[in-house]
Amino acid sequence: MARWRKAHRLDICLMWVTSSVANEYQDELGRRRTERVQRLLASGHLDAAEIGYELDAWHLGVIGMGASAEETVRGLAAGLDRELLSVSGSAEAVWAWFGGQRRLASTDIERLLSAKQAGGVSLAIGEPGRGIDGWRLTHRQAQAAMLIALRSPQRLTRYADVALLAAVLRDKELARSLLEIYLSPLDCEGNCGAVSRETLRAYFAAGCNAAKAAGALAVDRHTVERNLRTIEERLDRSLHICQSELEVALRLEDLGETARLSDDSQSPAR
């Protein structure tokens, strides 16, 4: 009996050592693959065989964030019937590419996600790109989309929907100046600043249709038109020539960047 127990303990120890060695080997393979991918992203040259992924194809870059990001990305690749390249980008973040000879649309991912809920996972995606240059670009676009996803987590953040906002977020001085030029003039005594912002959001959401905006705000059309004229007077410019800038400034405010940028400007230089 004692001999059996000793042999059993040895078997358990051997299994633990074997498992530990296997895990370390897989971790080392993962690290090497990540290093190769990072080198290739930095305009290095590698044989596609070194990363086990076909580069002469169409690619869609994806960054998954969340505890089950890897599982979600793998499920999407399988559901889309795409070759998958994935590496660890950071803690609970996965860099991935879906590859194939047919151009993959972002809407394909949206349809699949609606069928398979990605609980607790946020995805930032680029736009389709072909070849090595497209492979790099779609990843950069996903990284830009990730700036928004980190501030306003949702199931899917597409670069094409947030391109201007992401570009502004990369430059704090530019972001601060947008807020000062387009939102600060709206502030005055009372709640007129809040009313102006509410009117603008409803007006833009309604496709710049004052009647539809009035319906959404539960006010009459003349009230909306009067508020819009007041906004133009405070900005000293017509809304139609600065709509994009105003929409970006409002979205910066929605993301909480007003307070964050104000804190940065008041922080002592190091």
Image (cartoon, rainbow, N blue to C red):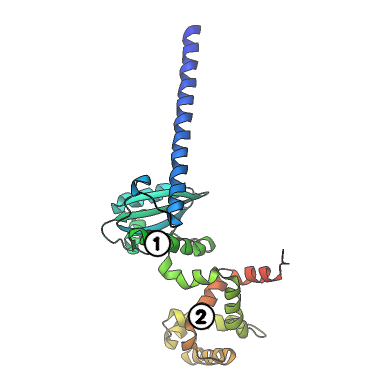
Q: Which mark is residue 6?
A: none
Q: Residue at x 45, y 62 (%)?
A: 140
Mark 2 belongs to which amino acid? Glu
Query: In the figure, 240 relative to 74: above or below?
Result: below
Quadrant occupied by the C terminus: bottom right
Query: In the figure, 37 relative to 16: above or below?
Result: below
Mark 1 belongs to which amino acid? Thr
Q: Residue at x 55, y 71 (%)?
A: 254
Residue, disc 1? 138
On the question of residue 107 being in view, the answer is yes
Q: Where does the image place residue 197, in percent across and percent down from the top left?
A: 55, 80
Mark 2 vs 1, N-terminal side:
1
Residue, disc 2? 245
Q: Is residue 57 left or right of residue 45?
A: left
Q: Nearer the viewer, residue 175 or 226?
A: 175
Q: Where does the image place residue 61, in percent across and percent down from the top left?
A: 39, 58
* SS of the residue under disc 1: helix
